[in-house]
Image (spheres, rainbow, N blue to C red):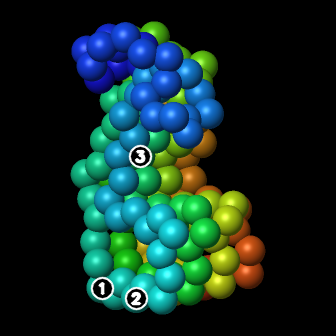
Amino acid sequence: GASGSTMCGKYYRSHPKDTIAGYGGADVRGFTFAGSSNVLVKDSTVSKLTSLHGCAVGYSVMMDSSNIKLESCTVGTVEALEEGEKSPQTVYDGCGFEFGVASKDCELKDYCVTTTKSMFGRSLKIIDGGRDNKVENETCKAI
């Protein structure tokens, strides 16, 4: 649903640990690793991801994940769009691979990102906010 939607009822926070009040939009992710360790994903493809009210990410390594290895992974079209009014509390990034600030010792090797789009946020192949992560060998060029 749209940011600010009351479709699920009126509430101040959707979860007790939320840091932003209200509904902020629907994020779309192909793969998510949160609090994970010692993971290998090889020869995998994510494509045709579209969020109409939030961010869209092909592969997202979040929280305190460590030793996540993504090898020969491809991201096709990833779009973060917005229908209607833009919410100031929603991130509208369109991204192929995202490594969050608490991720560490992760590796992205032999990767391909073809198309990322964002109407209001960043449109990037890779967002790496983590520690000691390695990114090497892009195997295709953006279209």
Q: Residue at x 51, y 69 (%)?
A: 35
- Residue 133 found in image quarter: bottom right
Tell me the residue that label 2 is attached to.
Answer: 40
Closer mark to the observer between disc 3 and disc 2:
2
Which amino acid lies under the numbered mark 1 shown in the image of this protein?
Asp
Mark 2 to mark 1: distance in Å?
Answer: 10 Å
Q: Residues within 10 Å of mark 3 (few under 14, many from 20)?
A: many
136, above or below 64, in the image: below
Q: Which mark is residue 56?
A: 3
Q: Residues within 10 Å of mark 2 (few under 14, many from 20)?
A: few
Which amino acid lies under the numbered mark 3 shown in the image of this protein?
Ala
> Image quadrant for the C terminus?
bottom left
**What is the x, y in percent for residue 124?**
56, 53
Work out whether residue 27 or residue 110 is closer to the camera in this orientation and state it. 27
29, above or below 104, in the image: above
Ranked by sequence position, the earlier of labels 3 and 2 is 2
**What is the x, y in percent for residue 39?**
43, 85
Q: Is residue 28 visible?
A: yes
Horizontal side of residue 17 vs 143, given as left or right: right
